[in-house]
Image (tube, rainbow, N blue to C red):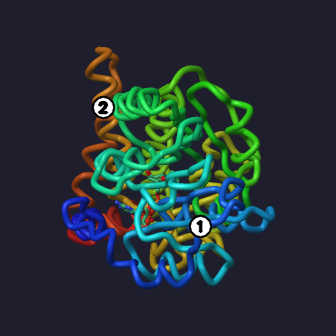
Amino acid sequence: AGRVAFSKINPSSLQFSRLGSQAARTFSVSSSRQDAIGFIGLGNMGGHMANNLIKNGKDIIVFDVVKENVSNAVKNGAKAAASPAEVVSGVKQVVTMLPASQHVREVYTGKNGVFSAVQSGTLLIDSSTIDTSVSQEMEQIAKGKNATFMDAPVSGGVNAARDALLTFMVGGDKFEEAESILKMMGKNVVHCGGVGTGQAAKICNNMLLGISMIGTAETMNLGMRLGLDPKLLAKILNMSSGRCWSSEVYNPCPGVLDGVPSSNQYKGGFGTALMTKDLGLAQNAATSTQCPTPMGSLAHQIYRVMTQSGYGGKDFSSAFQFLREQDKKE
Ligand code: NAD
């Protein structure tokens, strides 16, 4: 399923023209576009984020390779474009929310990509979690076009995206202009430094999150093995020193919390394949800085095994279900 999640959006199979006829019906160039915001990548997170811009009274022009995601945004009031180039051809501000480094590279530098049509003075904000070096590569190309690229990865999950409660970790110049846009989609917007520093903060956070989710999953499983009621155990953890976001806000054990992926067959949320990607980025960074991260390394391997075992498209809290299955095998 992990491979499905990534191959579905494999840049080599991109067909920007797939949306052509729909876009032609819904999109027309006008002077008001200069005030509109472009948005590319309308998945689990981007769909909600784009919607929050609309709720704040912004005109938005969108693109995604998945037609259904575009139609949902159009139903909410967005205009559809036929390619990233068409999104940026008039607007001065663009947000991208894509899965991984290769998708960002393709959307920005590919045929009919952002850089093929970007105007001088445009602010490009990438909220995807990607390799720091790719953000810096995009920054250099943007500079050559007199545009500004900033990295602004997020923390918070799909519910926070829906409720505009995300935390943005931002790298690059033009922080104030970026903040005015990001504030419509989040509650915390933190300037970390130059381009790439937002990504650095993000991968550190996600390394801790990946570790804490597995810790919470194995703790819940052990408690249940010992005969404890999972809701009672979660309640005790959350009033004790083991408390963390994974135990309190996003508990991986089905039935403990409503409205989280564990109570919805691990659908939606933050895919295990994406968590595996983030832990891989953290491990690359740890290797290049010779920084010891033994727990991060082990967590990376566990999510990797999960991704190879059909969990890639499920929310990463399915670490609990994965452990239960290993448990049953004994
Ligand atoms: P997702 O896979 O649900 O959405 C990505 C979207 O990008 C999809 O709609 C896909 O069709 C689109 N896309 C892919 N290639 C494209 C292309 N070439 N052109 C246009 N659109 C393209 O992913 P998500 O969960 O929304 O996550 C997006 C980013 O945010 C990732 O980098 C992820 O690591 C990060 N993130 C996710 C969460 C979460 O809880 N889901 C939380 C924090 C950060």
Local secondary structure at mark 1? loop
Image-based side of 49 in relation to 71, left or right: right
Task: Characterize the local packing of mark 2: few (<14), some (14-19) or many (20 or more) Cα atoms within 10 angstroms.
Answer: many
Task: Characterize the local packing of mark 1: few (<14), some (14-19) or many (20 or more) Cα atoms within 10 angstroms.
Answer: few
The quadrant holding residue 178 is top right
* Quadrant of the displayed image that contains ligand 1: bottom left
Q: Quadrant of the N terminus?
A: bottom left
The numbered dot on residue 283 is: 2
Question: 224 or 312: which is nearer to us?
Answer: 312
Question: 61 or 175: which is nearer to us?
Answer: 61
Q: Is residue 30 above or below residue 201?
A: below
Residue 80 in the image: state x and y as whole percent.
Answer: 53, 73
| Mark count | 2
The reply to whether residue 93 is visible in this rendering is yes
Residue 145 in the image: state x and y as whole percent.
Answer: 45, 33
The numbered dot on residue 29 is: 1
Q: Quadrant of the C terminus?
A: bottom left
Q: Are marks 1 and 2 in contact (CB under 8 Å)?
A: no
Q: Is residue 124 above or below residue 59?
A: above
Image point 54% across, 42% down: which residue? 124
Local secondary structure at mark 2? helix
Image-based side of 188 in relation to 84, left or right: right
The quadrant holding residue 8 is bottom left
* Mark before the other along the chain sequence, 1 or 2: 1
> How far is disc 1 from disc 2 in space, using C-alphas?
45 Å
Image point 45% across, 73% down: which residue? 266
